[in-house]
Image (tube, grey):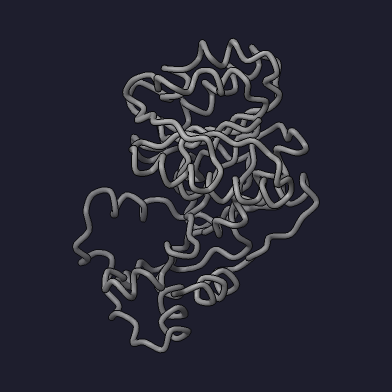
Amino acid sequence: MFFFFGMGFSSQAAARAIFAHDPSAVIAGTSRTKEGAAALTRHDISAHIFDGTAPGHTLGTELRNATHVVLSIAPDEAGDPALIHHRADLDAAPNLAWLCYYSTVGVYGDFGGAWIDETAPLVPRNARSDRRVLAEQAWRDYAAERGVPLAILRLAGIYGPGRSTFDKLAEGTSRRIVKPGQVFNRIHVADIGRITALAAEQKLDGTFNVSDDEPAPPQDVIAHAAAMAGVTPPPEVAFDSADLTPMQRSFYADNKRVSNAAIKSALGIDLLFPTYRDGLADCLSRQP
C-alpha cells in the first residue's frame, strides 16, 4: 500500500504511474482541504485531510498499513510536518519497506552555471532551501533508525499540462526576464511520476537529482513556447530592472546545470521528456 503525504501535482503524477503499472494498487494520501480530498477520492485514492499544522485525525490506520510512503510536503521552521505529527504512526507500520522524500535542487545553491551532480556541496542561499537540507537529514536519520531504504529525489523546476509556460502566456502572467548567463533545469511532471513508480518498485536507496537533460535560459523557453502557440512573446526585461518579489528574485540567485545521470543509471531509463522542447510539445498537445 502506498501513502503520500501531500497529494499535489507531482504525487498525483506518481499515483497515475503506479496505477498504470498495477491497476489494483492501493493508494492513500493527504490534501490540505476538503475539496482537494474529494477530488482525490474521484481518482480512486483514499483521501485524508492534513494541513501540516496538527495531526490528521483519520489517516493513522492507513499510514500504519503502508509499505511505501512518499513525502511531498515542504518543511516549515519547525521541521517536516509528517515527521512531527505522524512519526508514531510510521513507527507502528510493521510492513514499512520504502520511503521517498521529494526535495529540491535548491539545496545546492549557486555554482555560477557550472555542471554539478549529487556530490556537490550543499550551500543553500535562502531559508526555504536551508529547511530542505535539514529535512533531508531528518528523513535519512529516520530511515536508518527503521532500517528501510530511502530515496531522496531532488526535483528541478516542475512543469506539465495545466502548469506550463502556455498557461502563463494565456493568463498574461509570463515575463521574459533576462539575466545574462542564467540557466535553470526543469522536469516534466510525468517524468517525476514515472521515476517515483520505478524507484518504489526497486526500493531505490540514495539521493538523486531529477532534472532534464538540457538546462536553459528561462527567456528561451518562453520564446519557444510562444512560437509554438503562435503568439507574440512578452518583451524582454532586464533582471536588474525587473519588478520581482523577494521570493521571485531569490530563484535567480542560484545558477547551475544539474546532472541527472545518476537517476537514469540507477533505474536504467532515459527521460520521457529530456528537454523543454519535448515537454512543451506534450503540454501543447494536451491544451484544452
Residue 154 against residue 59 in the figure, above or below: below
Position of 264 with respect to 42 (left or right) is right
Q: Decide which of 283, 49 is in the foreground and name it.
A: 49
Position of 277 with respect to 146 (left or right) is left
How far across and down, in percent of the image, does residue 111 sit? 49, 50
Q: Decide which of 46, 72 is in the foreground and name it.
A: 46
The residue depicted at 43 percent of the width and 38 percent of the height is 124
- Badge count: 0
Instruction: Determine which quarter of the picture holds residue 204.
Output: top right
Q: Which image quarter holds the C terminus?
A: bottom left
The residue depicted at 39 percent of the width and 29 percent of the height is 50
Q: Which image quarter holds the N terminus?
A: top right
Seen as rendered, the residue at the extreme right is: 268
Residue 188 against residue 230 in the figure, above or below: above
How far across and down, in percent of the image, does residue 213 sit? 63, 62
Instruction: Determine which quarter of the picture holds residue 202.
Output: top right
How far across and down, in percent of the image, does residue 86 sit? 47, 17
Q: Decide which of 223, 100 is in the foreground and name it.
A: 100
How far across and down, in percent of the image, does residue 19 sit? 66, 47
The residue depicted at 68 percent of the width and 39 percent of the height is 25
Instruction: Determine which quarter of the picture holds residue 91.
Output: top right
Residue 198 against residue 165 in the figure, above or below: above
Q: Decide which of 267, 1 is in the foreground and name it.
A: 1
The residue depicted at 52 percent of the width and 32 percent of the height is 71
